[in-house]
Amino acid sequence: MASSAKGKIVIISSPSGGGKSSICRMLLQRNPGWRFSISYTTRSRRPDEQHGREYYFVDNAEFDRLAREDYFAEHCKVHLYQYGTPRGPLEAVLADGGVMLLDIDVQGAEKIKTIYPEAITIFILPPSIPALRSRLSTRGTETQEQLQVRFENAKNELKLWAKFEYAVINENLETAINEVESVIVSHHCRTDRIPPEQIKNIIGYEGV
Ligand code: 5GP
């Protein structure tokens, strides 16, 4: 059946260190009309992050209040903190058209796909486990304890790669960005995405 939603929700998941944040950042630079879903989190802000740009940084009480008010389309505990995707911006993009990128973990991906079955799901794979470990530790944003948690979780997250519709191996960042962009750009050409009215205008009837 063809989709009635105009916009595209694009879920990009990978273990920490897989490169999804860099991929999202570059995609947004290349495609200024695309939007990024800014999640809420209870983790502390890193020095290079801004409230309202990467995340909305809130305390546990505020996060729990928003969750109770059904403000999130999904929310999960990831590693040691809470993360949640606000529902409003997703609904706005679906109604108005456009592309919304979600950089979320595998649990969140599964929940969003259940609520929005037309969401595009892309998993970013590292070229190898040692490469993932080395990327994680060289970025220097976590303590040893946090790194260990992230690395152990990463090994479990990797097992879920085949649940996603697309998988992109991030060996070369530029190639990975091009591949993710191609998936997003070409998705609306799938036969099940073409509105029946449009087909009718072209060939005189709805086809199948
Ligand atoms: P980080 O703390 O490194 O920014 O993110 C940790 C993990 O949380 C990443 O896998 C990231 O994709 C995920 N994440 C970020 N925002 C959300 C969200 O709103 N929901 C879920 N489920 N995961 C999120």
Image (cartoon, grey):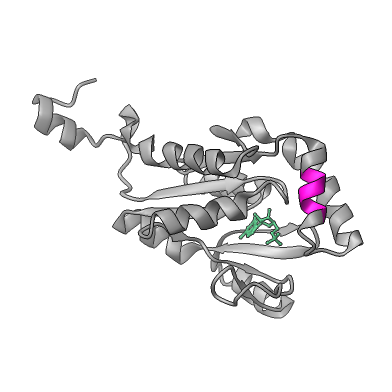
Q: Nearer the viewer, residue 133 or 189?
A: 133
Quadrant in which ligand 1 is drawn: bottom right
Q: Residue at x 44, y 64 (%)?
A: 89
| Residue 196 place in picture, x, y as percent | 21, 33
- Residue drawn at the location 45% of the way across and 66% of the way down: 88
Image spot of residue 191 (x, y percent): 31, 28
* Magenta run includes residue 58: no
Above or below for 103 versus 171: below
**Residue drawn at point x = 54 percent, y = 43 percent:** 174
Q: What quarter of the picture does the C terminus occupy?
A: top left
Q: What residue occupies the far top of the structure in this picture?
A: 208
Q: Is residue 136 magenta?
A: yes
Give how far across and how far down residue 26 sits, in percent. 50, 54
Question: Is 127 on the left or on the right of 33, as rendered?
Answer: right
Q: Magenta segment, which residues?
A: 132-137
Q: Would you place residue 35 above or below residue 109 in this image?
A: below
Judge from the rendering whether residue 161 lies leftward or rightward of residue 202; answer left or right. right
State the predominant SS element of the stretch in magenta: helix
